[in-house]
Image (spheres, coloured by chain):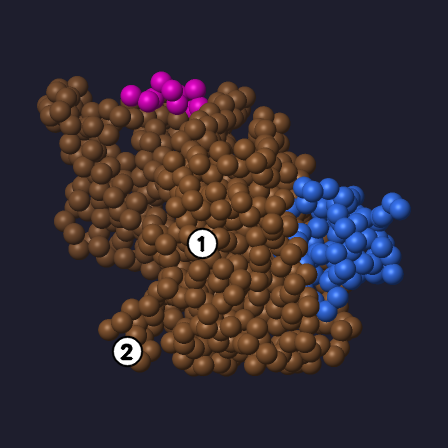
């Protein structure tokens, strides 16, 4: 089954991370806690393909990602 | 007394610097914008019979670096011969991201370093209803765990006491994967390392700068032989650690309220809104610039008057002559020319510190990323570019947080185009001389031109960034993964200390240069070897026998200046600058400005006072009455004034910036390219302006 990536989430949508599109995902993605099984919510998207802002469940800090990074992280909608 | 070296390590935004300040009492900057703690910060305190030497390492999410300041953490911790290598590490985490901090803690313990663990910001956790089982955490981490709140000072004494504790023996949480067991063994044997995990790090790090060339070559050879991709190893390790952590620490943190809309989220709905976010940011920028120019007015007038009084009384007290000119016009006026900018620099840094302390700066990075990317820059370049409006030196240093080499290099190369405060005195004096005091559409024309100079600086920065982006190649992918921490009330003491540090650094640095240059100029301008210098009186008497006493003195002085060492130097470069509309006296100002551009005005004051005996005029009046000997027109007319403005806008005239660029890029090539490009561009722009306008 083809999974969607974070960049397909609409504002306010929640999803679970299931994997990554390639092996070349920056180490920071993992270190920030964007890991398989983690539930996240799309909080905000900037226009003109600007970066997106997501919230990991239970974490008050937000994470900003460019579209290119958001595209690497695969999700399953809840 | 015993001494103990301690390193503070932690994820960004956990209040590590605030904790450091609380422990050492050393006046430092603390904050949550990634980039505040890029410089090495050390401090010390005495507790009992032990002196603790603290080093505050840059914030890092794990031991695998993705930027230059994160590399420092690995370099210091892995290398036991590093002068900063600690005897005890304090790992700091925040209650909402405990797992991330534990991961870093594990990596440090497995490198063989003793460490204790601190959970900071417990007040924020308690407010959110979060509770942490300290006993369980201590047991699982095999070390002392301290709960602190650095802002209120809670738990600091307990932390000091904990520094004396001996961490319990530690069992590695990460087992080297079986498929890499033999190759790790091979690294251990061939490089002479007895720690399994460090051998694994040799394989998985992009750079191991502490190894000698033989060792580094050995590691590279092993990597090639087994086709090891360091990045995959890092990912494998991080994933393995995280999944173990999930099971092991699930019962340590109790968070009853998983769903809550925080104050931060509500504020972010506005502050990073796709429309209002930008409106607010640009509104804030306008406010900052407005504040810089209006709030500083009374302070600047007061400083101006004070220095005018000082120069006046010194001039009256000292015997007339060139030494009088050196002290009043060169040194006092020169120092005054710097001190007068303290209010503006301080106001700018107050805003920048508040933005960093509150957590707003990372939102600026988020908002600006999309608009800076087409120029080969990253959202993180917004901070150096904004700081560049104050001074390029801290701005260039703040580029260290940019992970991508190419984006970082471009940011460093273009930041000096931003209109720094050292350009202001020149802009203000020259605009005052050549732009009429009129109104255009109800706006002050001189103010508009000044605003135009700022816009020109930004345009030059973005334009050259775009050119560099086309020319440079990179092997590294650019990315933006940025944590935006919760908003916090700025710790006002931190802001005040930061403003003080930055402002004094600028004043003292520039003040020293001005003092040195004033003295050098005075010496060069007062002595000479040529015949015309030594027989100036005879020559003037012979050429113009019927001058009055005062006119005679003036003539002698200016002839002496023209044939002094300084005059020879100015006349040497005159052919090159005549097409730009400058005479040899202005050439001296240009030469002096290559040390630091802010000395232009004081240099001109020294030059004009050496060349005349009339001490009544202010620098500005002297400049206004100066006549260019070649054209017979005022030296500062519209064409040459615009030409000067453009030259100062673009030319690289700051030794300190050149030095810092060399240090930060570690490349003479790029430093030279930047110098040549900026100065060449400045020359062409000034040339075209003068030739078109004259």
Q: Chain of mark 2?
A: B
Q: Which mark's residue is nearer the viewer, 2 or 1?
A: 1
Label of residue B49 in the image? 2
Residue B242 shown left or right of residue B36 in the figure = right
Residue A65 shown left or right of residue B567 in the figure = right
Q: Do marks 2 and 1 both belong to one polypeptide chain? A: yes
Q: What element does badge 1 sit on?
A: loop
Q: Main secondary structure of the magenta part?
A: helix
Q: What element does badge 2 sit on?
A: loop
> How many labels sit on residues?
2
Using a 10 Å C-alpha cutoff, classify the residue at mark 2 as few (fewer than 14 neighbours), some (14 to 19) or many (20 or more): few
User: Residue at point 43% right, 50% down?
Assistant: B75
User: Residue at point 40% right, 66% down?
Assistant: B88
Q: Position of residue B623 (x, y in %)?
A: 37, 37
Label of residue B565 in the image? none
Q: Position of residue A36 (x, y in %)?
A: 75, 56
Q: Position of residue B22 (x, y in %)?
A: 43, 73
| Colour in which chain B is drawn | brown
| Colour in which chain A is drawn | blue
Q: Chain of mark 1?
A: B
- Residue B370 visible here: no
User: Residue at point 53% right, 45% down?
Assistant: B182
Q: Quadrant of residue B228?
A: top right
Q: Is residue B454 above or below residue A6?
A: above
Label of residue B195 in the image? 1
Which is more toward the observer, B539 or A78? A78
Q: Which residues are magenta?
A: B572-581
């Amino acid at each position: 089954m083809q999974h969607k990536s974070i960049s397909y989430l609409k504002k306010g949508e929640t999803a679970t991370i299931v994997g990554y599109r390639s092996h070349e995902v920056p180490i920071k993605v993992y270190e920030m806690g964007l890991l398989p099984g983690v539930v996240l919510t799309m909080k905000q998207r900037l226009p003109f393909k600007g970066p997106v802002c997501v919230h990991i469940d239970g974490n008050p800090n937000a994470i900003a990602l460019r579209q290119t990074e958001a595209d690497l992280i695969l999700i399953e909608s809840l | 007394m015993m001494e103990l070296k301690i390193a503070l390590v932690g994820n960004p935004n956990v209040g590590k610097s605030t904790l450091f300040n609380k422990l050492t009492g050393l006046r430092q900057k603390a904050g949550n914008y990634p980039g505040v703690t890029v410089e090495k910060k050390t401090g010390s305190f005495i507790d009992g019979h032990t002196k603790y030497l603290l080093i505050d390492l840059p914030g890092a999410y794990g031991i695998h670096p993705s930027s230059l300041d994160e590399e420092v953490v690995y370099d210091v911790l892995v290398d036991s011969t590093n002068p900063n290598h600690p005897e005890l590490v304090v790992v700091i985490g925040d209650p909402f991201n405990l797992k991330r901090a534990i991961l870093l803690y594990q990596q440090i313990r497995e490198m063989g370093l003793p460490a204790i663990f601190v959970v900071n910001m417990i007040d924020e956790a308690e407010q959110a209803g979060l509770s942490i089982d300290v006993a369980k955490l201590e047991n699982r981490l095999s070390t002392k765990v301290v709960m602190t709140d650095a802002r209120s000072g809670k738990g600091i004494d307990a932390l000091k006491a904990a520094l004396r504790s001996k961490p319990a023996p530690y069992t590695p949480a990460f087992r080297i994967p079986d498929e890499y067991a033999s190759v790790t063994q091979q690294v251990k044997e061939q490089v002479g390392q007895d720690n399994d995990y460090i051998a694994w790090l040799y394989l998985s790090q992009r750079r191991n700068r502490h190894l000698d060339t033989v060792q580094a070559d050995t590691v590279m050879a092993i990597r090639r032989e087994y086709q090891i991709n360091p990045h995959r190893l890092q990912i494998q390790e991080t994933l393995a650690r995280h999944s173990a952590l999930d099971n092991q620490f699930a019962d340590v943190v109790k968070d009853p309220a998983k769903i809550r809309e925080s104050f931060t989220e509500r504020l972010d709905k506005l502050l990073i809104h796709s429309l209002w976010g930008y409106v607010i940011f640009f509104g804030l920028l306008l406010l900052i610039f407005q504040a810089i120019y209006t709030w500083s007015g009374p302070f600047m007038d007061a400083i101006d008057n004070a220095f005018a009084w000082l120069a006046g009384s010194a001039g009256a007290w000292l015997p007339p002559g060139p030494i009088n000119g050196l002290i009043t016009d060169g040194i006092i006026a020169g120092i005054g020319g710097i001190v007068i900018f303290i209010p503006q620099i301080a106001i700018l840094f107050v805003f920048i510190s508040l933005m960093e302390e509150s957590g707003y700066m990372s939102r600026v990075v988020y908002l600006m990323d999309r608009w800076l990317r087409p120029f080969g820059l990253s959202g993180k370049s917004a901070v150096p570019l904004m700081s560049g409006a104050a001074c390029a030196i801290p701005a260039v240093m703040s580029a260290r947080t940019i992970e991508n080499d190419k984006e970082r290099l471009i940011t460093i190369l273009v930041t000096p185009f931003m209109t720094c405060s050292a350009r202001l005195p020149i802009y203000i004096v020259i605009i005052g001389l050549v732009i009429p005091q009129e109104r255009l559409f109800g706006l002050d024309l001189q103010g508009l031109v000044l605003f135009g100079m700022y816009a020109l600086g930004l345009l030059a920065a973005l334009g050259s960034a775009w050119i560099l982006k086309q020319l440079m190649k990179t092997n590294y992918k650019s990315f933006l993964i940025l944590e935006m921490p919760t908003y916090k009330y700025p710790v006002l003491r931190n802001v005040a200390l930061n403003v003080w540090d930055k402002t004094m650094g600028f004043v003292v640095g520039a003040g020293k240069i001005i003092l040195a240059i004033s003295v050098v100029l005075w010496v060069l301008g007062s002595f000479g070897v040529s015949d015309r210098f030594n027989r100036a009186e005879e020559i003037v008497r012979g050429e113009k026998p019927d001058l009055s006493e005062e006119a005679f003195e003036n003539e002698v002085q200016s002839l002496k200046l023209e044939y002094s060492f300084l005059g020879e130097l100015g006349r040497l470069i005159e052919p090159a600058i005549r097409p730009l509309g400058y005479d040899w006296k202005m050439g001296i100002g240009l030469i002096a400005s290559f040390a630091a551009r802010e000395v232009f005005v004081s240099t001109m004051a020294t030059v004009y006072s050496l060349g005349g005996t009339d001490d009544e005029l202010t620098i500005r009046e002297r400049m206004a009455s100066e006549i260019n000997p070649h054209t017979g027109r005022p030296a500062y007319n519209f064409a040459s004034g615009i030409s000067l403005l453009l030259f100062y806008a673009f030319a690289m005239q700051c030794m300190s910036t050149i030095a810092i660029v060399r240090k930060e890029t570690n490349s003479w090539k790029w430093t030279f390219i930047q110098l040549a490009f900026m100065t060449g561009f400045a020359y062409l722009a000034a040339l075209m302006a003068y030739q078109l306008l004259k």
